Image: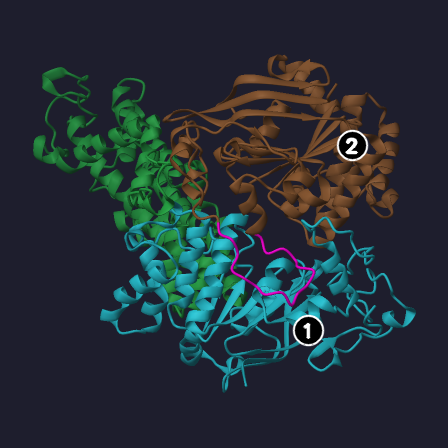
Chain colours: A brown, B green, C cyan
Amino acid sequence: MSLLTVENLRIELALRSGPAPVIDDLSLTLEAGKTLSFVGESGCGKSMTALAIMGLLPDVGRVAHGTIRFDGEELTTLPDTRLREIRGNDISMIFQEPMTSLNPVYTVGEQIAEVLRRHKGMSQRDAWTRAIDLLDSVRIPNAKSRVSAYPHEMSGGQRQRVMIAMALSCAPKLIIADEPTTALDVTVQAQIFELLRDLARDTGTALILITHDMGAVAEMADDVVVMYAGRAAEVGPVDAILKDPRHPYTQGLISCVPHLKADPTAARHDLTEIPGIVPPLSSFGTDSCLFASRCAHAHDRCLSARPKAFACPAGQFAACWLEADG
Amino acid sequence: MTDTFDPRKPDAEQPIEKPRSPAAEAWSMFRRNHAAVVGLIVLTIILAIALFGPILYPEDPFMMVWTPFSPPGEQGYLFGTDYLGRDIMALMIHGARVSITVGLAAAFVTVTIGITVGALAGFFRGFIEEALMRLTEFFQVLPTLLFSMVIVALFGASLPMITLAIGLVSWPAVARVTRSEFLRIRELEYVTAARSGGVRNGRLIFSVILPNAAPPIIVQAALMVGSAILFEAGLSFLGLTDPNVASWGQIIGSNRPYILDASYTVTVPGLAIFVTVLAISLVGDGLNDALNPKLRAR
Amino acid sequence: MSLLEIKNLSVRFRVKRAWGKSSYLHAVDDVSLSVPRGQTLALVGESGSGKTTAALAAARLVPAAGGSVMLGDTDLLKLEGEALRQARARVQVIFQDPYSSLNPRLRAGAIVREPMDALGTPDKPDRDARVAELFAQVGLRPEQRALFPHQFSGGQRQRIGIARALATSPDLIVCDEAVSALDVAVQAQILNLLRRLQTDLGLTYLFISHDLGVVQHMSDRVAVMYMGRIVEEADRIALFSNPQHPYTQALLAAVPSVERAKRSGVKMTGEAPDPLNPPPGCMFASRCPKVQPSCKASPPPLDAQAPDHRVACFFPGE
């Protein structure tokens, strides 16, 4: 059985103009020890999916339809107290900005120990020893002395390691990382990715990685969900999607980035542009392909009906009418 | 946000928003704060009374019109008469003009000094900042009531002097807010861009940074009007006032001995001060909502 | 003949310490660079490497502690007062943050007009036409001049910033992480626009970025900075195909790739030194995979390894 199964999830935000589906008909599965990546531009609902799984939707949001099954429990109908238990023990989250996620007036050791005492009922002494072990496991050099450091005394990369240590403290089954390296330098990002990969391998923790960077997806993920305007544009194994992207949005996302080329002497053509921007939230419910206004291949059917997800030869699903026509 | 986005059209044909000025945005935010709207209505009524009252109610506030201490309503005098038999209604209208004028003028003095000191300190840094901030701290640690009493006692209890005294003891708060806003905004990229575009320092201070620093200063200034009215009332109550005019505070002060026998003589001006200052605070709170970009997200 | 010739540029910041003591942070240390007219020099490095500070110091927006910045025949660092203000027309900056780089109280048209009004060029009657022309050049619609910044998307805001930078017809444009705050799809639009403008108008760019893919796409020459100093500087192709400094090699290896290629072996370990208390030797020694004892004794000079390829390392190459 899968660790996480999301089926036909629809999340509506109450706007002044009426409810708008910020997530629409999203389905996915995630097995233990695997990494799933959400990729897309900002405003496409990547972070909202994570918040829905955590049961942390904003006040104006609600699950309108669908199910989220995690480890045998249906999260959408659980009472708050049980959700809070799950959040502490089984699902952890890592955020983009490691500085604002840590409390500046406590040492990092105190903050990790606090989590352990609250969720695991450890004694102060045990929690402190465990905090040092955790800092060691996220490769903070000289953990024994760094455990008494305040967040501002650490570099950005080290703070993000502390956040990962906190996320790991209760040995969760699933870690959700929302753009965990966007604020970090590329060399630090490489170290954090390596750490997350090793942790997933050693502990069997599943990882959801939210990112806008196809390179990061390629490095980290087993499966990928390409999100556009609240809908899954393309879902499937990373290899299939990178080798043979079928949705024009996925193709655009891959080719619009100037990736580092193996051969620097190659000619530098203009980048593929995806013209325009993501449509406003209020139009997310329209029964048409929301990407049509930016798509070079759009035709009449794209405008009159929402495309279903079609199975592609390489193994992924793409929600595009072009795929239906072969 | 426009709701007329049409996914059928290419991007270049999507409708563009109507230009909405920051002032229009601010007003729409202000309107959402109902208490502030009530405050604004009350304040408008009070201002109207101060402006047009003497025309609509041309009674001389300093004339003895009836028996002293006649209770409200008697002989058609809405608020009755005071210990000298003067019409309290007429005194109140006259007092509204005095109190509000002093409040506005003192707030003006406060803001002028505060902005000048704060802007120079925040913009130029270095020695100028050190000197100006030490000066600000000096004024801030002076006991305000005592210091203003000394000024009034030394230079005479005329209204302009009282206004100046209030302004002189109140400006450090404005200077601090202005300086901290300047310190923040001068590092923003659009200020660097303006410098890079050859904009001169004077324009940089007054046309680029100050308008963006204005919101918290405006809120401060609004609240300052209220506190200046209170301050003036306090000074008048202590008798430090121009005997030729009657502010609300002075009406309370002069009727103080009769507070037990004719309580309305102090209740009416007291309520007027309370309502006015409350209305100003509510409006200030509404301005804070209206001008705070963080609350404007949706 | 280079348009911009930076020689021995240094920038120091005074950092206050407890009890009235202060020490200096050498944000930029002895940086020399040259940019030929019509070309793009990229300054690459991680946060805190001093790349932005160096460029802003060259543009006289951050005070320099020493060196010279020759733009044509003028040393920008020697100008003061009115001469400096007039010279600002020749160097303009495109900023990183499309939100904080536009004055929220001005309409888009007024933002683009601001440098023209301040510097008095072109003549007043021609300015409106120039604003319209700039809007067309950066792909904005003329009726959008009346809008305020918050009514634009991030990419459109960056276009306004580009139009403002072009307003004075500058010789040199500093692009300070001009696309790193944008979504990938919008980033491509802006990069294409910058390249098109360079071809059409013959612009010279000093292009600051931490994104090596973007740098490879945009630059003609590349200088890699680490902790205030240039560690490697070369022609684009030479730098990417044959990086000599271990830091450059580590940077290149750290970039995630869609090709899912195996990383090469260069990995950094350790932490960067305290910039307020720099070590006597090579700044990179604490993180370098092939550090030798001699590296910690004295700093390596930035020497030419090959014609046109400078490296500051005692043991360059593989």
Element type where label 2 sits in the image: helix
Element type where label 1 sits in the image: strand
Q: Determine the main secondary structure of the stretch shown in magenta.
A: loop
What residue sits right under mark 2 in the picture? A168
Residue lying farthest to the right in this orientation: C293
Q: Nearer the viewer, residue A21 or C230?
A: A21
What residue sits right under mark 1 in the picture? C233
**Figure check: B156 above or below A16:** below
Residue C48 rendering spot, x and y as whole percentages:
67, 60
* Residue located at (15% from left, 26% from top): B85
**Figure check: C58 above or below C252:** below
C6 left or right of B168 in image: right
Q: Which residues are magenta?
A: A257-273
The quarter of the image holding the C terminus of chain C is: bottom right
Q: Is residue C25 visible?
A: no
Q: Which mark is residue C165?
A: none
Q: Please tell me whether residue A263 belongs to the stretch shown in magenta.
A: yes
